[in-house]
Image: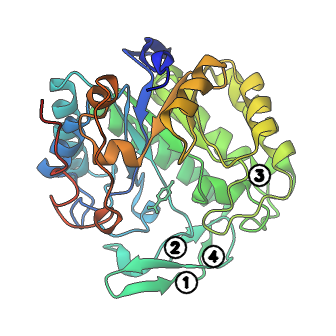
């Protein structure tokens, strides 16, 4: 096997001390309760994967309106916090570190998927193209309702409270999901944000919500426990960015002084933009180069493009991923039919290697 040594060097990401540099990326799994409460099965799944440098959890709604998919966890009620406590205790008992990802989906939502059944909320009342899975199969998403300026401020506060809840539940940190076409990315975009208040129009206005959320969360739980995830140039979930080479450098310059634990980039293939953002970011950079082999990812660390790399499907399918890679053992492949449902099947039953 090629040289993967760069993966196994210790690292720091803000307050997080990491024994190596291979992290588990956040992945929606759809196995919490209808009320968004993490279960014992969820705790088992994450604890099985505790040898990753950071276990970054699936997207977790900071408020009831932040949910859009079936059976995703939340972190805005006492029951949810108690459920997360089981998860963090289990990961810590297995010597791991766990960061809860806060994901407000905005317009990427269907009322049938939530306990409240309300119309989704978003920067503007612009319906996203595409379908999403509901109990009755793939379904178009309705047009969302635009948040008022006051409601945007309240949504910033929802993230602040959710971050406090995550830490109260024992999380080592919080990752703010600003990527992949969800609420924060909708504010950044040129097609989902038609606002005329201070959150829309110019680049400075479109990055305002992202910066306010990051500032509020860092203020609440400490910058050293706060990460931000972005996906420059990724059109996923019907997001259009007309000038990512202006937008993202402006955003990263605004985030840099916050001294956050890390910036987590979903790499959509623009290498010059990645190099620019790396040069603008003074802290730890977590890189998700989806689909790349491990040698390519290790080379990103060697070359200084990343400090930490995150992997999705590999971590999903291999509870003992770090051990398998270090021992040169073959990896299990992931079964996409059980990504979002199936109980223990395709969740906690991926085998560890037999020695
Ligand atoms: C998904 O559930 O499909 C999903 C969630 C979060 C992402 C990307 C995809 O960042």
Question: Residue sitting at 29 percent across and 48 percent down?
Answer: 317
- Is the C-beta separation of discs 1 and 3 under 8 Å? no
The residue under label 4 is 128
Q: Is residue 35 left or right of residue 222?
A: left
- Is the C-beta separation of discs 4 and 1 under 8 Å? no
**Which circle, 4 or 1, is nearer the viewer?**
4
Q: Is residue 149 left or right of residue 56?
A: right
**Which circle, 2 or 1, is nearer the viewer?**
1
The residue under label 2 is 120
Q: Quadrant of the C terminus?
A: top left
**Which circle, 4 or 2, is nearer the viewer?**
4
The local secondary structure at tag 4 comes to loop
- Is the C-beta separation of discs 2 and 1 under 8 Å? yes
Q: For residue 278, what is the image quadrant?
A: top right
User: Is disc 3 surrounded by few (<14), some (14 to 19) or many (20+) residues within 10 Å?
Assistant: many
- Using the numbered discs, state the Cα–Cα distance from disc 4 to disc 2 in whole angstroms: 11 Å
Q: Is mark 4 within 8 Å of ligand 1?
A: no
Residue 118 in view in this figure: no
Question: Residue sitting at 21 percent across and 62 percent down?
Answer: 33
Q: For residue 325, what is the image quadrant?
A: top left
Mark seen at residue 206? 3
Mark seen at residue 142? 1
- Using the numbered discs, state the Cα–Cα distance from disc 1 to disc 3 in whole angstroms: 23 Å
The local secondary structure at tag 1 comes to loop
User: Is disc 1 surrounded by few (<14), some (14 to 19) or many (20+) residues within 10 Å?
Assistant: some
**Which circle, 4 or 3, is nearer the viewer?**
4
Question: Residue sitting at 76 percent across and 39 percent down?
Answer: 271
């Amino acid at each position: 096997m090629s040289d993967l040594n760069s993966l196994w060097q210790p690292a720091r990401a803000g307050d997080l001390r990491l024994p190596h540099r291979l992290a588990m990326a956040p992945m929606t799994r759809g196995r919490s309760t209808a009320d968004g409460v993490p279960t014992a099965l969820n705790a088992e799944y994450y604890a099985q994967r505790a040898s990753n440098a950071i276990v970054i959890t699936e997207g977790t709604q900071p408020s009831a309106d932040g949910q859009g998919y079936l059976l995703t966890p939340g972190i805005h009620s006492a029951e949810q916090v108690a459920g997360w406590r089981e998860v963090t205790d289990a990961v810590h008992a297995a010597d791991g570190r766990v960061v809860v990802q806060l994901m407000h989906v905005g317009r990427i939502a269907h009322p049938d998927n939530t306990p409240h059944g309300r119309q989704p909320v978003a920067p503007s009342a612009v319906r996203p193209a595409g379908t999403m899975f509901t109990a009755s199969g793939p379904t178009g998403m309705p047009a969302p309702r635009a948040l008022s300026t006051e409601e945007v401020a309240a949504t910033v506060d929802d993230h602040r409270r959710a971050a406090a809840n995550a830490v109260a539940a024992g999380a080592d940190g919080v990752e703010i999901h600003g990527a992949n076409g969800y609420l924060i990315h909708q504010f950044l975009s040129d097609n989902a944000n038609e606002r005329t208040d201070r959150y829309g129009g110019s680049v400075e206005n479109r990055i305002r919500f992202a910066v306010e959320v990051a500032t509020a969360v860092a203020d609440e739980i400490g910058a050293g426990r706060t990460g931000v995830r972005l996906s420059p140039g990724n059109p996923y979930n019907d997001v259009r960015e007309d000038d990512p080479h202006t937008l993202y450098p402006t955003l990263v310059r605004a985030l840099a002084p916050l001294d956050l634990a890390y910036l987590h980039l979903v790499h959509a293939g623009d290498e010059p933009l990645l190099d620019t953002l790396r040069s603008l970011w003074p802290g730890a950079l977590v890189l998700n180069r989806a689909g790349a082999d491990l040698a390519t990812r290790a080379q990103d660390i060697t070359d200084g493009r990343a400090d930490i790399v995150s992997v999705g499907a590999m971590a999903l399918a291999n509870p003992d991923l770090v051990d398998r890679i270090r021992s040169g053992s073959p990896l299990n492949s992931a079964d996409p039919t059980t990504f979002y449902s199936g109980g223990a099947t395709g969740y906690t039953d991926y085998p560890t290697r037999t020695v």
